[in-house]
Image: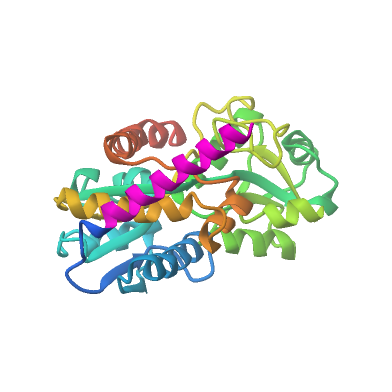
Amino acid sequence: MKNLITAAIAAFGIAVSAVSATAADWTPPGPIKLMIGFGAGGGADTQARLIAEEIEARTGWQIIPEQVTGKGGVNLLNEMKDMPNDGSVIGMVVSESLGYNLYSSKADMTPADFTSLTTTAGFQMGVVSQSSKGWTSISDAVAAAKAGEQLRFGAMSQRLVDLAYLLGKAQGVEFNIISVKGGKDVMNGVTAGDMDLGFMAGIQGKGVAAGDLVNLASALSTPLVQTPDAPTFADLGVAFNSDGYFMFAGPAGMPEDARTALTEAIASIASDPATKAGGLIQKAFGGASIIKGAELDALVAKQFEDSAALIKAASE
């Protein structure tokens, strides 16, 4: 056992050295502008700022965060597309920004107009309500709707609006879907009683742990880490889901040395629960989910291409 532990420590040391060496092989041409596609205080914004803080401490690079919000990250992509691709400009978005949001915006852009760097965490997207409503699963909410309650369902993107509609359709009910700007607005609406249920992508974790909120369903293709018994959308007859990731990207054509250095710097911090950013990711999202390189390119391209089927289904 001691030998195994020693080997593990040695391997970890080699990995850290490799990351440091990679970062040392590239130096940004100046301060790095970090554009953040979502509002202050949310999961994306908090992650991005904590990661930037740790990168500065580890490398000495200067990183300047800047909010560029709107249209689920598309405003950021539109602004970043024609900026320098030398590593001096990067953005924190979500895979949905480069997928459904970009597709549905009908902007003259595709994922090929950007350099994907790395994901940091997967969404823990649940359908959530206050526990005081007495619901323990989505079936209870559906029963209330069938009994005549007009249920207000909060969603923070058009993709989620479509999914809420398809969930209601599959369950034989019609939700009053309320579109808001972010997960924090959904949580505030549910907590205040202005919404009966809504999508939350990990921000609900503390409330669920405290017993104030309940995950009624997983909007993912897999069970939620915190509430594995909650049914998935597939269980509920919905052929689509909200699988997605928080991620960093830059303008297209970023040189490989810059892409590698930035990717490894971000991924090493997100994967380390001893850092503030890694600790947040562990607590709110069940741990880091790192996808990078060609695998990430393929993921965002597929989400972009698959958007047409979801939009068509939600229009029927």
Residue 163 falls left or right of residue 216: left
Q: Position of residue 306 (x, y in %)?
A: 35, 32
* Residue 54, picture quadrant: bottom left
Residue closest to the eye, 169 or 69: 69
Position above or below: 206 against 35: above
Q: Is 57 covered by the magenta stretch?
A: no
User: Can you say which quadrant of the picture contains the C terminus?
Assistant: top left
Residue 5 located within the stretch drawn in magenta: yes
Determine the residue positioned at 23% across, 62% down. Answer: 80
Q: Is residue 196 left or right of residue 181?
A: right
Per the rendered image, the range of residues in magenta is: 1-23
Q: Is residue 138 left or right of residue 77?
A: right
Residue 202 in view in this figure: no
Residue at screen point 45% across, 56% down: 269
Q: Nearer the viewer, residue 190 or 111?
A: 111
Q: Is residue 3 positioned above or below 266 on the image?
A: above
Looking at the image, residue 163 lies above or below residue 115? above
Between residue 58 and residue 133, name the one nearer to us: 58
Q: How is the image coloured?
A: rainbow
Q: Residue at x 54, y 39 (%)?
A: 6
Q: Compared to 276, does 247 lie above or below?
A: above
Q: Is 86 left or right of 297, judged from the image as shown?
A: left
Place of residue 168 in the rendered image (x, y in percent of width and height, measured from the top left): 62, 36
Residue 1 percent across, percent down from the top left = 64, 31
Most distant residue in the front direction:
3
Look at 58% across and 38% down and name the residue there: 5
Task: Decide if residue 295 is in sight here.
Answer: yes
Q: Principal SS element in the magenta part?
A: helix
- Looking at the rendered structure, the number of numbered marks drawn on it comes to 0
* Percent coordinates x, y for residue 41 in the rendering: 54, 69
